[in-house]
Image: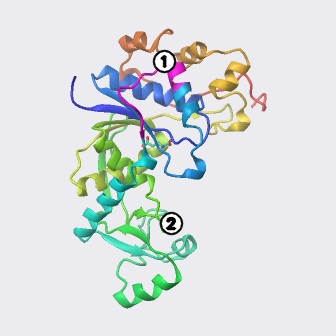
Amino acid sequence: MTAGAGRFAPSPSGDLHVGNLRTAVLAWLFARSSGRGFLLRVEDLDPERSRTEAAQLRDLTALGLSWDAVPVRQSERTGYYLAAIDRLSEAGRVYECFCTRSEIADAPRAPHAPPGAYPGTCRNLTEEERARRRRDRPAALRLRADAEQYTVKDLLHGTFTGPVDDMVLLRNDGVPPYNLAVVIDDAAQGIDQVVRGGDLLTSAPRQAYLASLLGLPEVVYAHVPLVLNGAGQRLAKRDGAITLTALAGIGMDSDDVRNLILASLNLPPGTLENALDAFSPALLPRGPWVFDSPGSVLPGL
Ligand code: GLU
């Protein structure tokens, strides 16, 4: 077995739709075609939105995906996230932040600051100011970043440079954020290839920067095109039959859905193992896949 693994890491906040399923198939193909293992991680840090793990795993299995170990659940790994924050804290890399969302939105910021970047309000508070503000509001913890941008390698996008800022390391309700957990978990699971939806490309530099601060190995990314509806928007419930269950309801079984996904990748129908022979990252379509569901409730769009 070669070192390294790929993974799929869904948030169990709803049934997987064909876009998520296509990303999972791609993650599996990228991993297996490069001799890597393939692992699953359930990103269930938000307990309110974590109810569909079993259905997601069932659908992935129905599609023909297999993974090499019991799936890891983020909700069971809080101790590892806190330990990483402690290490950063010992290195002087953590500070308390008392800002509300609206304070962050309204704060003045440098003209070149990337949209949404933390404006640094709490970065240099004195001990007295911190003590005073702690009485009003529990603190979140932020990273004291010393870079404004970072570069990652992406198999589909080449090198990609994007903004890095003082990201949140612990929310003020004590929940670790995705951007921290993903870095710790990818390293802990031995993952060195991250294939996921293109919407996360702009998050990769801050994740890779954090990994570098923690002395964790680099990963190679492949941010794959999203799936859009006939109107060019991201798939949503209103698009009708977009989950395996809903598609089964209009007569498409999981083999049909897999074949549809494979066709969208210019790959032959059949099993995933069969598709592996024809799979080559260089031959992948680079644009979004438009999925006009046969069950769309917005005909003609
Ligand atoms: N859990 C994230 C999602 O479902 C994916 C995170 C990742 O692949 O890094 O969108």
Marked residue nearer the N-terminal end (1 or 2): 1
Q: Quadrant of the N terminus?
A: top left
Q: Is residue 5 left or right of residue 18?
A: left
- Considering every residue shown, the one lying at the far bottom of the view is 128
Alpha carbon separation for disc pair 1 and 2:
39 Å
Q: Position of residue 40 (x, y in %)?
A: 41, 33
Q: Quadrant of residue 224?
A: top left
Residue positioned 58% across, 28% down in the render: 18
SS assignment at label 2: loop
Q: Is residue 245 left or right of residue 137?
A: right
Here the colouring is rainbow
Report the span colored magenta. 59-72
Q: Position of residue 292 (x, y in %)?
A: 67, 26
Tell me the tag on residue 173: 2
Residue annotated with mark 1: 64
Residue positioned 54% across, 19% down in the render: 62
SS assignment at label 1: loop
**Nearest the eye: 258 or 298:** 258
- Compared to residue 183, the image places residue 228 above or below, namely above
Q: Quadrant of residue 111?
A: bottom left
